Image: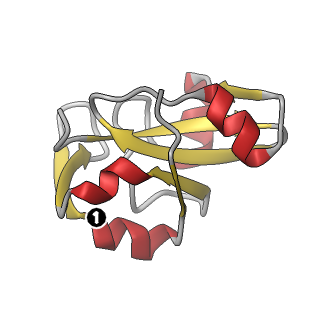
């Protein structure tokens, strides 16, 4: 699971953030609240995920999104050179270089896992 990443959409106040973590990890909303200085942090619902990313829950890729979204990558993702990620459909995966994900988003790189 450490070779897989999840691309999860969070609603943080009035904004959305794409949070990328290793497949075996969960995102700590407590850490997100502290990092972003915002109390109102929750996982986006399926309708929001589709509207903001252009992809259904479970299929969101870490790159190629419909809209430019602020991004946070958990620092443990950087321990891998390449990762498998959602490929735009529930039954599709893509194999990507972590450096390409970073170039695409210019993300915050932080410890956000539980």
Disc 1 target residue: 98
Percent position of residue 12, x then y: 75, 38
Percent position of residue 75, x then y: 41, 53
Please identify the residue farthest to the bottom as the structure is shown.
103
Instruction: Name the quadrant of the N terminus.
Output: top left
Taking the image as shown, residue 62 lies to the left or right of residue 114, namely: left
Residue at point 28%, 64% (across, down): 98
Residue 40 vs 72, above or below: the answer is above
Residue at point 18%, 44% (across, down): 93
- Provide the secondary structure element on which disc 1 rests: helix
Display colour scheme: secondary structure
Taking the image as shown, residue 107 lies to the left or right of residue 59, namely: right
Residue at point 41%, 76% (across, down): 103
Residue 43 vs 7, above or below: the answer is above
Percent position of residue 61, x then y: 36, 49
Taking the image as shown, residue 14 lies to the left or right of residue 94, namely: right
Q: How many callouts does the rendering have?
A: 1
Badge 1, how many Cα within 10 Å: few under 14, some, many 20+?
many
Residue at point 56%, 28% (across, down): 28
Q: Nearer the viewer, residue 14 or 112?
A: 112
Percent position of residue 47, x then y: 60, 27
Q: For residue 9, which quarter of the picture?
A: top right
Residue 1 in view in this figure: yes
Residue 54 in view in this figure: no
Taking the image as shown, residue 111 lies to the left or right of residue 91, namely: right
């Amino acid at each position: 699971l450490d070779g897989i990443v999840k691309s999860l959409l969070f609603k943080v106040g009035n904004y959305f953030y794409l949070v990328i973590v290793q497949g075996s990890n969960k995102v700590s909303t407590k850490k997100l609240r502290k990092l972003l200085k915002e109390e109102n942090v929750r996982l986006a619902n399926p309708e929001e995920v589709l509207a903001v990313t252009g992809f259904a829950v479970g299929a969101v890729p870490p790159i190629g999104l419909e809209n430019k979204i602020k991004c946070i990558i958990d620092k443990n993702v950087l321990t891998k050179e390449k990762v498998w990620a959602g490929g735009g459909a529930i039954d599709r995966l893509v194999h990507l270089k972590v450096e390409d994900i970073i170039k695409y988003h210019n993300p915050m790189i932080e410890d956000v896992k539980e």
